[in-house]
Image: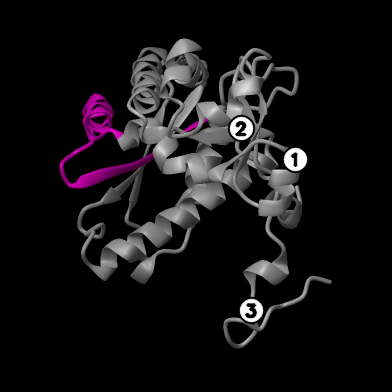
Amino acid sequence: MDLFDAIINRRTTNTAFADKKVTKEHTDLLIKMSSHCPSHFNSQPWGFILVEDETVIKGIAKIAGDSMTQLMDDGRFWKQYRKYFRFSEEETEQSGDGIHLDHLPAYLKPFAKSIFSEAGGKIISRFRVSKILGGDEEKLVATSPLLFVILLTKDEYKKEELSGFYSVISMGAVIQTLWLVTTAIGMGMQFISTPGEIPGNWKKISEMLKVPEDYEMMAIFRMGYIDPKVKRPVIDWTSSQRKSISELAFRNKFGNHIEEK
């Protein structure tokens, strides 16, 4: 696939993957391409764990699903991310960002805005929304053939120092590379974010993977081959909209908008 096409066609995969193991050729390719990413002073501050053991994957899936349920039940999820929720195509086009909740069970659609609001706790409980999202999260992770874990060495990842900032920039290059490589070879990937919002759960996964003390576990992605026939989760969203160039970019100084051709 052409590089520009890969950038434009890159998507987060919200659905399950094909029931197929990731080949060694492709896992080797993911590691090799990641190892060629730029880093400050060529420090190469990263480490990678590729999880293919089904028992370990299911253990991480259980933690991820429980994390989603907990975040929804105690209100943290919608309090932090409510500003990104869109409930119509018009709202989506107007904002140019966020996620469009376009796939809900019929009985939930009339309550969509209420569910994802500060007053939504009772509705979330009544319709078991947290259980639905938690169950979908666990299933999606548990059925993934590959989890790709990114670590940063604590020699570089020092949160209060510039080296920490530089190492995170390097990790961003790794993540973008992984997304482009998976797109180019017919694979998809999705960030497993919910355990990271509950420190105790993140620590459980780190201990499960035996991450050494001199490394920090930074991110986990589930990966697999795309299957267009797979059904979407019960509650799902899209996020293909993009802000205009004139809104994002300026020439020479802030305020001098660059007009889109």
Q: Which residue is mark 1?
A: 89
| x, y percent for residue 30 | 52, 41
- Calculate the distance from the C-alpha at mark 1 to the C-alpha at mark 3: 27 Å
Camera-nearest residue between 110 and 27: 110
User: Which residue is rendered at x = 22% and y = 32% of the image?
Assistant: 203
* Residue 149 in sight: no
Is 206 left, or right, of 30 in this rendering? Answer: left
Disc 1, SS:
helix
* Vertical position of residue 16 compared to residue 161: above or below: above
Q: Residues within 10 Å of mark 2 (few under 14, many from 20)?
A: some
User: Which residue is rendered at x = 54% and y = 44% of the image?
Assistant: 84
Of the two numbered discs 1 and 3 in the rendering, the one whose residue sits closer to the viewer: 1
First in sequence, mark 2 or 1: give its number.
Answer: 2
* Residue 29 in sight: yes
Camera-nearest residue between 84 and 33: 84
User: Which residue is rendered at x = 79% and y = 71% of the image?
Assistant: 260
| x, y percent for residue 195 | 34, 31
Q: Which labelled disc corresponds to residue 250?
A: 3
Q: Which quadrant of the view contains residue 249?
A: bottom right
Q: Which residue type carries mark 2?
A: Thr
